[in-house]
Amino acid sequence: MAPVPAPKPTWYHNGHEISEDTAEGFRFEAYGKTLVFNVTQDKAGKYDCRFPVHNDIDRTFNVIVEAAPYWPDGPPPNTNTSEGETVTFDCTTSGKPVPKVTFYKNGVGKCFGELFSRTHFSYPAPVESL
């Protein structure tokens, strides 16, 4: 009696089959039972491991990829202005979970839409001649 070969699964990512021909960024090990890949944002999603004859051992799982907060266009630059002018700071951020952005003035957090106004000016003390 010939030995029965171990079943080989078919892998899917977000409903699309991952074949050895189209497995960009994926690698199969252990006769296809292990899927190996470097974690990137595009690898997040639903994975299915399906066995054509033994669907009682099929498995489905989700991969969630988190990313530290970052500025896609770089941090907002420092800005010099004059009294009475309007200044806009663009603080576009990305990451997962979505970053919470808080602006501060003199160590005090400001709400979005709240106006920043310079209320205190300090000048050098006048010099008196004796």
Image: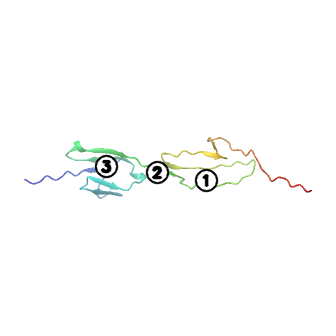
Three-letter code, disc 1: Pro
Q: Quadrant of the C terminus?
A: bottom right
Secondary structure, mark 2, is strand
For the residues marked 1 and 2, what is the alpha-carbon distance in whole angstroms?
A: 20 Å
Give residue 14's position: percent from left, percent from top. 35, 47
Secondary structure, mark 1, is loop
Q: Is residue 104 above or below residue 21?
A: above
Give residue 33's position: percent from left, percent from top. 26, 52
Residue at which label 3 appears:
12
Closer to viewer: mark 3 or mark 2 = 2
Closer to viewer: mark 3 or mark 1 = 1
Residue at which label 1 appears:
76
Residue pictured at 36% horizontal, 45% vertical:
62
- In-image side of 80 versus 49 (left or right): right
Question: Mark 1, residues whose alpha carbon is within 10 Å: few (<14), some, or many (≥20)?
Answer: few
Mark 3 or mark 1: whose residue is earlier in sequence:
3
Residue at which label 2 appears:
67
Asked whether the residues under the numbered discs 1 and 2 touch, taking CB atoms below 8 Å apart as contact, a structural biologist would say no
Q: Nearer the viewer, residue 86 or 1?
A: 1
Residue pictured at 49% horizontal, 51% vertical:
68
Secondary structure, mark 3, is strand
Mark 3 or mark 2: whose residue is earlier in sequence:
3
Three-letter code, disc 3: Tyr
